[in-house]
């Protein structure tokens, strides 16, 4: 099938893209408003984009049916300039899912999901104690595109539980951390447990030999 996106609705485009660009890492983002009210919400339009400087990016759509009204996460980051990306693993998946619920403003996703917080080192926003890794970030820039905001954050501190770090690299034992990824919609996710495959890169000289 072919899909001309000039003739495709936003809803159809969304369904196609989230079904094809998989699996997607999940950022469980903690942010605070100016009064210190803490918010936690998961986003799978997330990845790292460069390492010098270290930049991560997240796409946050506006609230449904309310043109140009940002979600709490985007609004908090724009006003305070800080946030924390808590990495989502199997053992906190259910708690993460609770944070995706659209609770009234006076209700705390962190408390309702049963998370606890610990102070960050360089930003005011706390991280989640149950997350095995977290990235403290400061807003680098925010781009408003259509009904979405693309937020780029500069990572200023990284926390990883000792058991998942090989100091020699330092290397992260991703095969032991058991992150989960977002698949298409409908509440579908994928595990990384026992799913790793290794495909070594091929040096050019070796590749040439294989062609002979």
Image (cartoon, rainbow, N blue to C red):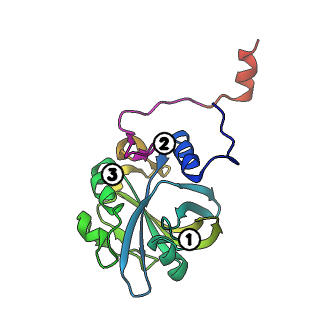
Quarter of the rendering occupied by the C terminus? top right
Name the residue nearer the viewer: 171 or 60: 60
Magenta segment, prevailing SS (helix, strand or loop): loop
The local secondary structure at tag 1 comes to loop
CA separation in Å, label 1 and label 3: 45 Å
Region rendered in magenta:
180-200
Quadrant where the N terminus sits is top right
Residue 203 image label: none
Q: Which residue is mark 1?
A: 67
Nearer mark to the viewer, of 1 and 3: 1
In contact (CB < 8 Å): disc 3 and disc 2? no
Badge 2 crowding class, 10 Å Cα cut-off, few under 14, some 14 to 19, many 20 or more, is some
Is residue 189 shown to the viewer in this render? yes
Residue 67 in percent (x, y) is at 56, 71
The residue singled out by tag 2 in the image is: 23
* Quarter of the figure with residue 151: bottom right
Residue in the picture at 38% in, 84% down: 36
Q: Earlier in the sequence, mark 2 or mark 1?
A: 2
Q: Residue at x 49, y 47 (%)?
A: 24
Could you tell me residue 3's position as x and y percent?
Answer: 65, 38
Q: Nearer the viewer, mark 3 or mark 2?
A: 2
Q: Position of residue 201 (x, y in %)?
A: 62, 31
Q: Which residue is mark 3?
A: 163
Q: Residues within 10 Å of mark 3 (few under 14, many from 20)?
A: few
- In the displayed structure, would residue 11 be above or below residue 123? above
Q: Is residue 156 part of the magenta span, yes or no?
A: no
Give the structural element (helix, strand or loop) at label 2. loop
Question: Residue at coordinates 44% horizontally, 33% vertically from top-left?
Answer: 196
């Amino acid at each position: 099938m072919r899909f001309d996106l000039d003739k495709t609705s936003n809803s159809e485009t969304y369904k196609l893209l989230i079904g094809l660009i998989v699996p997607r890492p999940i950022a469980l983002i903690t942010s605070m408003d100016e009064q210190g009210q803490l918010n936690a919400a998961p986003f799978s339009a997330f990845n790292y984009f460069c390492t010098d400087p270290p930049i991560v990016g997240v796409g946050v759509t506006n609230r449904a049916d309310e043109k140009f009204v940002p979600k709490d996460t985007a609004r908090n980051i724009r006003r305070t300039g800080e946030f924390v990306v808590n990495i989502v693993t199997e053992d906190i998946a259910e708690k993460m899912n609770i944070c995706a619920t659209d609770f009234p403003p006076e209700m705390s996703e962190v408390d309702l999901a049963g998370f606890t917080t610990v102070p960050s080192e360089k930003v005011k926003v706390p991280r989640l104690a149950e997350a095995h890794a977290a990235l403290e970030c400061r807003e680098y820039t925010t781009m408003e595109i259509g009904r979405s905001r693309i937020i780029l954050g500069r990572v200023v501190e990284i926390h990883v539980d000792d058991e998942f770090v090989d100091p020699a690299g330092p290397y992260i034992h991703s095969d032991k951390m058991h992150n989960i990824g977002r698949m298409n919609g409908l509440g579908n996710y994928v595990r990384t447990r026992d799913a790793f495959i290794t495909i070594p890169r091929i040096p050019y000289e070796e590749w040439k030999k294989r062609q002979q």
